[in-house]
Amino acid sequence: VHEGILRRQSARESAARTYARALPIVPVRARGLTIEGADGRRYLDCLSGAGALALGHNHPVVLEAIRKVLDSGAPLSVLDLATPVKDAFITELFRTLPAGFADRARVQFCGPAGTDAVEAALKLVRAATGRNGILAFTGAYHGMTAGALAASGGAPDLQVGRLPYPHDYRCPFGVGGPRGAELAARWTESVLDDPKSGVPRPAGMILEPVQGEGGVIPAPDDWLRRMRRVTADRSIPLIADEVQTGVGRTGAFWAVDHSGITPDVMVLSKAIGGSLPLAVVVYREELDVWQPGAHAGTFRGNQLAMAAGTATLTYVRENGLAERAATLGDRMMKQLRQLQDEFACVGDVRGRGLMIGVELVNPAGGSVPQARGSESDGWDSAAAPPPADPELAVAVQRECLDRGLIVELGGRHNSVVRLLPPLTISDEQASAVLDRLADAVTAANR
Ligand code: PMP
């Protein structure tokens, strides 16, 4: 069964398939952290639907919420009509939003995916400001539709200006630490204040508080506060893309809560749907310039996703799973740093909460030359890191799979092993994950 399904699907599916290439498994059952394949093998799933499963697979409260809607005879497809299920979702969502935001915010339900909500956010700030350009950051990922893709980099521009995102390990200025973040912030200010930069008055700035697909790069809180100030001073709406970082993942309910900033727009998806497709933008009411029909979409009313989402948000809030993610994440990263001490190929361990990245490098490859900061200004220059090692990362991912552990790769060079376990992962399961990963690194490093 297992081989047949794999063969048939890889013969017929488009060459654009991604996860299935690295993970030749055929999931048939799942619960919590565990997935069982058609071949009877069991895996610890640290991909978690690319971060969509805050409570893991098939959590009882999520299943119960879905069953309740199904058994109630409520309509499942309702466009954007008002329903009791939606009312409950909005109420719970607003209970969790950053304090400076919640009582004066509006929510727009979007198409089903994160990229739809990004698209809506870009469109909203353009409509609200009457301006066009967007500022985004190096290494960003916002989705696969045209606007979101342009803001992610690589695509021909939709008037997107790109700014340096602070990165301790591969600092764009070769200095790392607070000094690197300071230079990144100054660069941003100079772009905004230089009439020749092409983007002096953009419609908005979009950022991820922790870059996920970009290789798990947490932005320093000071830098985020600075971006908040820089945009507020110039009346530029700040969009926080919390598609991946939201719902407790980083150790706070929303990742912006760490820095205490209140963005103008928040883009939310993945975990807010409790494993089913759901995406919204939440924004300050002053930005609500849309007239009826200005932003439509057939699948904005998924009742099952809203019910699953309400159950998830409530469970995370009532059970303090964000705090749990913070403590367990710190413990896991501490252990991973021991692995880093042991293996020169583990170049960096970073993350926030249960959003963790392990960057694999080739220590024999020398160091990557970087633009250096001034050596005499009293700040430490970061040691230039060795080159990224995507082949080793792929080998580690394969060795993990052989040991029953599913991990995802990311980063600009695809050299970062990413862990996004459910927030419900137990201490014992976390230890099992780390043991298997350590064994995989040992095997792949030979
Ligand atoms: N923004 C961020 C920060 C993401 O991580 C992702 C997906 N990985 C998206 C947007 C796009 O979401 P989707 O894949 O649901 O379109």
Image: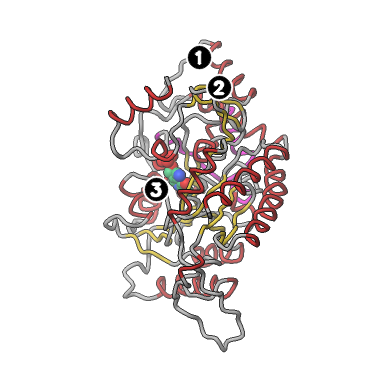
Q: Are marks 2 and 1 in contact (CB under 8 Å)?
A: yes
Q: Is residue 141 left or right of residue 403?
A: left
Q: Amino acid at mark 2?
A: Pro
Which residue is at the front of the view, 23 or 203? Answer: 23
Q: Are marks 1 and 3 in contact (CB under 8 Å)?
A: no
- Based on the picture, tell me whether residue 107 belongs to the magenta stretch: yes
Residue that mark 2 sits on: 84
Q: Residue at x 64, y 60 (%)?
A: 342
**For the N terminus, which image quadrant?**
top left
Task: Write the start and end of the magenta stretch as one range.
Answer: 87-111
In whole angstroms, how far apart are the C-alphas of marks 2 and 1? 10 Å
Residue that mark 3 sits on: 124
Q: Can the viewer see residue 282 in this picture?
A: no
Place of residue 110 in the rendered image (x, y in percent of width and height, measured from the top left): 42, 36
Residue at disc 2, secondary structure = helix
Q: Residue at x 38, y 40 (%)?
A: 18
Residue that mark 1 sits on: 74
- Based on the picture, tell me whether residue 415 belongs to the magenta stretch: no
Q: Is mark 1 within 8 Å of ligand 1?
A: no
Q: Is residue 391 left or right of residue 46?
A: left
In whole angstroms, how far apart are the C-alphas of marks 3 and 2? 27 Å
Ligand 1: quadrant of the figure: top left
Residue at disc 1, secondary structure = loop
Q: Amino acid at mark 1?
A: Ala
Total count of labels: 3
